[in-house]
Structures are given as structure tokens and as C-alpha cells.
């Protein structure tokens, strides 16, 4: 069977007679693409057997096919239809893996004692700073961590640390906090603004900190 053109895909997926076969072809194609993505050397999936990856790819392909159909009206023909559909499928897989990674995430972890910011070695460049500059960086890191805990409300602190420092997906955090993405965006925006103002009051401007850690 010859490769479908963009118009062929769109017509078949919207034709009551041809749709079943077209959906099957699309789902199979997306499953192969997702399986290839999952089978790469990913540390979070390294312990899974091929059969488990296949099942995961099948499940994601089902969801991706539905997502493609829901967004069919947005396809503008600027690329091959299969390329566009595959991008949707891979983004869905990435999102699903990120949610799975943080399925046991707890807000209580963010308020536990311990080091919050990365160590100085991970924030600096490859060149070794002078003892004076290293001490200055340590002092600034301590002030930033103190500002995070003192200048922000508990919810602002939890949201900003989770997203900016821990990399927790917005949708996961919104669910944990009993909120929604729009409210969470505003919460984080307000937290950033309050933190910036607090640090500036102590003479630590953004330019100063970028210069300090960018060398």
C-alpha cells in the first residue's frame, strides 16, 4: 500500500467508512514511534523488559490517537501529517513519564529540613573561583535560601521550589495543591516578584547575582 498523502489521511480519518482502517494504521505508526522513544537509553525505564515497553507504547498510542483526533482541525499541512501526529504522541509520552516520575511527590518534602539549593560546585562554571569569590557565593546562596523561607508564604514557597528547583510538572503540582494551572501560574509569578524585591532590599540585584555565578 502506498504512503497516504496529507489529504488522504485527513479524508480517511473523517470518513465513516474508511475511518476504522485509518485509525488502526495511525495507531500502529504512533506505537512504533513511541516504542522507539521509550527504548532509548533512558535511566528511568532501564529496568523494564521489552514486553513492558511494548505494553506502555500500546497504551500511549491509544491515548495519542485520541489526542490527534481531538486536534485534527489544527493540522495546517505545514509538515507531513504523520510527522505532526508523531510529535503529538512523543509529547504525550514525555508528559506521561514526567507525571509518573512525580507520582509519589509530596509537598511535605519541600518543607523538610536540609539543603534546598544546589551546592556551590553545581552553580559555578568550570573555572575555580578565588577564595574570596567562593565565600561571597556561599553567602549569597545562604541569603537566597533564607529569603525563600522568610519572604514567601508557605504556598508560594512550595510552588516556587517545586517548579523552579525540583522540576515538578505544573499539572502534577496543581493537583497536589488542590489548584489549577492558571492559579498556580499567578502564585509562582507573585512569589518570584516578592523574592526579587526581598533580595533587592538586601543589595542583591539580578545583574549582581548573574555576574557572581556566571564567571
Image (cartoon, rainbow, N blue to C red):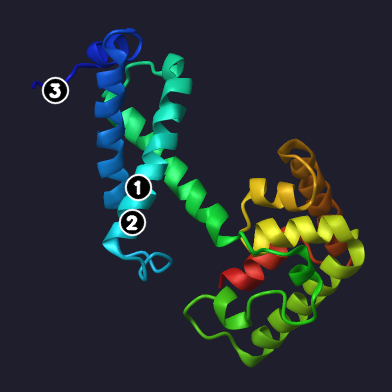
> Which quadrant is the N terminus positioned in?
top left
Dot 2 and dot 1 residues touching (CB under 8 Å)? yes
Residue at (71%, 87%) from the top-left corner?
A: 135
- In-image side of 118 versus 22 (left or right): right
Question: Dot 2: within a 10 Å radius of its alpha carbon, few (fewer than 14), some, or many (20 or more) residues?
Answer: some
Which residue in the structure is indicated by mark 1? 57
Q: Against 90, is 148 above or below?
A: below
Q: Nearer the viewer, residue 161 or 140?
A: 161
Earlier sequence position, callout 3 versus callout 2: 3
Mark drawn on residue 3: 3
Decide: is 139 above or below 177: below
Mark 3 vs mark 2: in front = 2
**Rounded to the nearest whole Å, what is the CA distance between mark 3 and mark 2?**
27 Å
**Residue at coordinates 30% horizontally, 37% vertically from top-left?**
30
Q: Which quadrant of the figure has residue 214?
A: bottom right
On the image, the x and y values in percent for residue 112 come to 79, 76
- The mark that comes first in sequence, 3 or 1, is 3
Query: Which of the numbered marks, if any, corresponds to residue 53?
Result: 2
Which residue is depicted at the point 32% across and 20% down? 78
Distance, label 3 to label 1, CA atoms, is 23 Å
Badge 3: residue crowd in 10 Å (few <14, some 14–19, many ≥20): few
Residue 40 sits in which quadrant? bottom left
Of helix, strand and loop, which one carries label 3? Answer: loop
**Residue 110 location in percent, x, y?**
76, 69
User: Disc 2 versus disc 1: distance between alpha carbons?
Assistant: 6 Å
The answer to which of 2 and 134 lies nearer the viewer is 2
Amino acid at each position: 500500500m502506498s504512503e497516504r498523502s496529507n489529504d488522504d489521511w485527513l479524508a480517511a480519518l473523517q470518513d465513516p467508512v474508511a475511518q476504522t482502517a485509518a485509525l488502526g494504521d495511525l495507531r500502529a505508526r504512533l506505537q512504533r514511534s513511541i516504542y522507539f522513544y521509550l527504548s532509548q537509553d533512558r535511566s528511568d525505564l532501564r529496568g523494564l523488559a521489552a514486553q513492558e515497553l511494548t505494553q506502555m507504547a500500546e497504551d500511549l498510542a491509544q491515548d495519542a490517537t485520541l489526542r490527534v483526533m481531538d486536534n485534527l482541525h489544527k493540522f495546517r499541512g505545514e509538515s507531513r501529517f504523520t510527522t505532526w501526529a508523531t510529535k503529538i504522541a512523543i509529547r504525550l509520552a514525555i508528559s506521561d513519564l514526567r507525571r509518573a516520575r512525580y507520582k509519589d511527590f509530596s509537598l511535605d518534602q519541600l518543607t523538610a529540613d536540609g539543603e534546598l539549593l544546589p551546592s556551590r560546585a553545581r552553580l559555578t562554571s568550570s573555572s575555580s573561583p578565588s577564595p574570596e569569590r567562593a565565600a561571597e557565593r556561599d553567602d549569597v546562596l545562604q541569603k537566597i535560601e533564607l529569603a525563600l523561607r522568610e519572604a514567601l508564604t508557605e504556598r508560594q514557597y512550595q510552588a516556587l521550589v517545586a517548579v523552579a528547583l525540583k522540576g515538578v510538572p505544573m499539572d502534577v503540582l496543581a493537583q497536589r495543591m488542590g489548584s489549577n494551572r492558571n492559579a498556580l501560574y499567578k502564585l509562582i509569578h507573585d512569589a518570584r516578584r516578592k523574592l526579587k524585591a526581598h533580595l533587592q532590599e538586601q543589595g542583591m540585584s539580578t545583574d549582581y547575582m548573574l555576574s557572581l555565578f556566571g564567571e
